[in-house]
Image (cartoon, coloured by chain):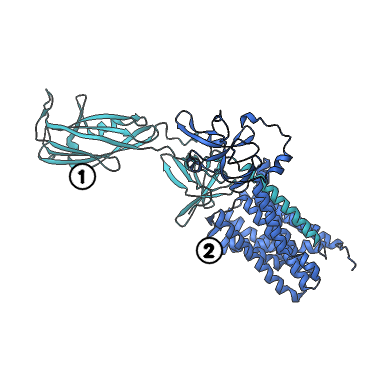
Chain colours: A cyan, B blue
Amino acid sequence: MKKSKFLALVLVVAIMLMGAGYAFWMEDLKIYATVNTGELAFTFANAEFKNGGDYVIHGGPVANDYVSGEVSIAEDGALNIILNNLHPGSYALVKFDMKNIGTIPLKLTDFVFEGENANLDQIVVVADGEPLSLEEYFKTLEGISIDVDGSKTIELLLAVKKCATEENFEEKESFDFTVKGNVRQYNDDGSCEVTPDPEPEDPVKTGLKFVKTYECKGKDQGHNGKQWVEVKGRVYYTFSEGEDEFIENIDTGKIYKGKSWSKNYDGYKLEITYNNNGAISW
Amino acid sequence: MLKQNYLPTRSKQNRSLLLISLLILIYLFENSTVTSYIDNFIFSYILKPIIWVGMVFLIWNLPKFRPKAKLKHKSLLYFWTFNFAVIYVIITIIAGLIDGMGKSPYSHSPKGIFINIIFVGTYLVGREFIRNYLVHSFTKEENYLVFIFAALIMTITKFPISKYLGLNSLKSTVMFIAEFFAPEFAHNIFASYLVFLVGPLGSIIYFGVIQGFNWLSPILPDLKWITTALVGILCPVFFLMSLQNIYLKITKQLKKREEDDENPISWAITSIVSILIIWFAVGVFPIYPSVIATGSMEPMIKPGDVILVKKVFNIDDINALKVGDVIQFKRDSILISHRIIDIVNNETEGLYFKTKGDNNDSSDSESVKPQDLKGTIVYTVPKVGWPTLFIKGDKNIDLDSL
């Protein structure tokens, strides 16, 4: 019995010393902060219908009350244009801003048009005197970069082709279409490189709560039923349990909840949400 | 009574060495690069169980040992072993209610559970058979050197080699020992005693209940490493002493006088209280004591008083501070406790606090930044700090800075 007591005493003293170590190493104040990832966000803004009427080639546009219009911004930032009482040779002047409301510079990649009206082909945009189809015109806007909180103002002179006939264009037509802009990060050339973000400490130690997005090094690969990604030399496994998703740091064996796996152009993004003690959160 | 030193026969020695070698071989194989050529599922869930079943089969065919306890006592000892395992699970759950719980990462589908039972079960049974053979090969009587030896081998082979190689600082080493190695070692000491007393079934019951909870429970305690150390080390040691006590009582080897001396519960209480006192003093808990050396905060706090400081943990605690609060902060290598007289937060310099001792004529020359903060004073205990001041009296501190 005495030997077991001695062993017990040794272990108790060891526990006391561990406590001293814990107090010493954990004494630093941890600044808990919520660090948000850079947000890519684009919207059309300040849209207005300026005027409309008959379009005269040799002079300037003539204002009249025939063509009326309405422009608005949808909830998702798309630009909606409604033009009424169009006829061949009429025009509409529409003004809007293209705005960066995110936290990182962006670049416009392409535009998507949505509208049921088949007369889209008969609408041209007059830019520098040259008529371009809507699609051709917006193509010239592709590649424009906009800084954070920056915007670019566009004035669109939309005109109906004079050769628009009854067959391909109905008069007094109400014309409704929506434009959406697609963007990517300004310095993203489509390759999948590791971004120079500072590597966070193991959240179990620091207790940081944050969402961090990493550009992955290489694409995901399946491995024994689990996807994995390498980020700055660390390998993370991802797996699902029911509806929940987890990632596992194979160096430490710690498992975190809230992995988000999203495709981004040619590569992948790994978003990790850590809660305050690094455990799988409720 | 004549104590006999039990010496293993040559054949038992050889067999023990063979088993230890096999155990080490399996361990090295698991940690080698060879496994990367094998499909993970096949290796983990088919090959490994086959290896462990093979070990059980091998040991089963060796000459068997009779455990120490008589047959009539075994059922009671099994019963207590089961109880101890359940107590351990309950204690970890209670600790988890304090430190935090988390969702289990393990599969709880019927297929997942079945596979896990095979995977964990074969590993558990195989290792306990090895432990049983080792312990009984080297001793017939209670021999703590043998128990420690067996526990060491089983503990070392529990963790992957990469875990040991990843220890690159004192801090990481201590944390590894506290959170993983020492608790596992303590469990293994108890398990070695169990196999000595009742054979492999005892340790299988013990680990089986604990592992069963670990793998099958949908929620698990997520303990700080120091809590894991406390619970993981103390519990098995307490169980060991208790089981010893129970065994000595049922075999009537314990005299009444000794029974009172050897009460494991009183030992456990004494140990826990001692640990908690030491931990409180060194600052493990959110509130810690600190002795005041000067009169800069008189009349509220006098030299020799002990203040209780509530730690500031995060930005929310810092933002909750207001003018008039008495805070403790670090300057150079000393702790100073003064009152906040102003809080400044601007874009160029960030957040900082202006402080002043109540008994000082002017405010402190240097402002206090958040990273210097230790905590706020919540209570003052008069005069009890004089012995500490007396012991530390020869240290020279620049009193002007206070």
Residue A199 picture location, percent across and down = 53, 37
Task: Please tell me how crowded label 2 is: few (under 14), some (14-19), or many (20+) other residues with Cα within 10 Å.
Answer: few
Left/right placement of residue B9 relative to residue A89 reads right
User: Which residue is located at x 58 percent, y 34 percent?
Assistant: B359
Could you say whether the residue bearing mark 2 is in a helix, strand or loop? helix
Quarter location, residue A233 = top right
Check disc 2 and report the residue beneath it.
Answer: B111
Look at label 2 and name its amino acid. Lys
- Which residue occupies the foreground of this view, B125 or A219? B125
Q: Chain of mark 1?
A: A
Left/right placement of residue B112 relative to residue B193 reads left
Assign the C terminus of chain B to one quadrant of the image.
top right
Residue B374 picture location, percent across and down = 58, 40
Residue A78 picture location, percent across and down = 28, 40
* Separation of marks 2 and 1 at Cα, in angstroms: 51 Å
Task: Please tell me how crowded label 1 is: few (under 14), some (14-19), or many (20+) other residues with Cα within 10 Å.
Answer: few
Check disc 1 and report the residue beneath it.
Answer: A116
Residue A258 picture location, percent across and down = 47, 49
Q: Specify the farthest residue to the front.
A: B299
Look at label 1 and name its amino acid. Glu
